[in-house]
Image (cartoon, rainbow, N blue to C red):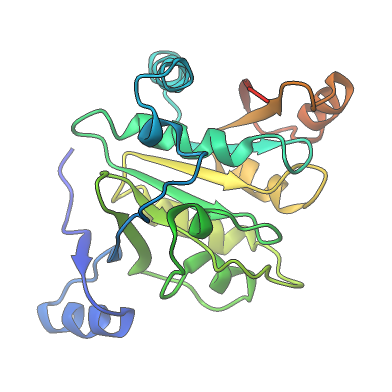
Amino acid sequence: MSREVDLALWTNPSEALSEASAVGARPTIWLEHVTLPGTLDSRLVLLNDPGSESARSYRLLRHRLFSQADPRIVAVTSAFPGEGKTTCALNLALAMVEDTMTRVLLVDVNLRRPALGRVFGFTPFENLVENMARFVDVGPPYPVAAISGTRLHVAALPETPIEGGRLDRTLFAVALSDLRNAYDYIVIDAASVFESGDVDVIGECSSGVIVAARAGRSRKGDLRRAIGELAPAHVLGTVLIDA
């Protein structure tokens, strides 16, 4: 499938818009480059220990998604916080970009417990999800970060929770539609089901939802209730994260 120019590198969005106006084009994204910290977060399994059994499990998850439904926008959630959804989203996205020609965006949409900026050791210059939560008119170019040493792009949030913010369904759906022109797959690190109603919006805008559960912590009853709460979103399955 042919694509129009959709990727550009500028210092800030205003430069992107100025340049786009000059050439009569409007890129989908603008990039900031992020260097990974010297000590990697332990949740980055595919970077810390790519040959481990856990890393192979995420590659198997990628294979099953590709070979069965091949969903292009995958949201990852859990019943409650602390059950491994961010770990699952991180490593699924990293497993996806191991495919040579695959372009993947990982998006933090957990307004109350943002995690991706901390994991990758940076605070985003600007972020599209915060603008949506504050009902700011959002449009391209969308700010994302290119993570050094990987082919992964990340749309992170600042570490500070967005008090009183909520995800606008229309703005989010439009942004995802635009971003699909630039990326083959989008992985969303969502809030947990019983923590935020934003998960309903995310589920409706996604191709499918994965529900993470942590061994020794998650309860079967809570997991069943969470899957029920996600309806009518398509639940792709559950992933058990080691304690």
At 13% across and 84% down in the image, what residue appears?
Answer: 22
- Quarter of the image for the C terminus: give it: top right
- Picture quadrant of residue 232: top right
- Picture quadrant of residue 225: top right
Indicate the position of residue 111 as horizontal and vertical percent values. Answer: 66, 61
Residue sticking out furthest to the right: 221
Residue sticking out furthest to the front: 39
- Picture quadrant of residue 47: top left
Whether 173 is drawn above or below 95: the answer is below
- Quarter of the image for the N terminus: give it: top left
Indicate the position of residue 179 as horizontal and vertical percent values. Answer: 37, 53
Specify whether 130 is left or right of 120: right
Specify whether 76 is left or right of 221: left
Specify whether 40 is left or right of 26: right
Residue sticking out furthest to the left: 23
Whether 13 is drawn above or below 175: the answer is below
Q: Is residue 210 visible?
A: yes
At 84% across and 19% down in the image, what residue appears?
Answer: 220
Indicate the position of residue 38 as horizontal and vertical percent values. Answer: 35, 53
Indicate the position of residue 2 as horizontal and vertical percent values. Answer: 15, 43
Q: Is residue 72 visible?
A: no
Q: Nearer the viewer, residue 127 or 33?
A: 33
At 80% across and 27% down in the image, what residue appears?
Answer: 217
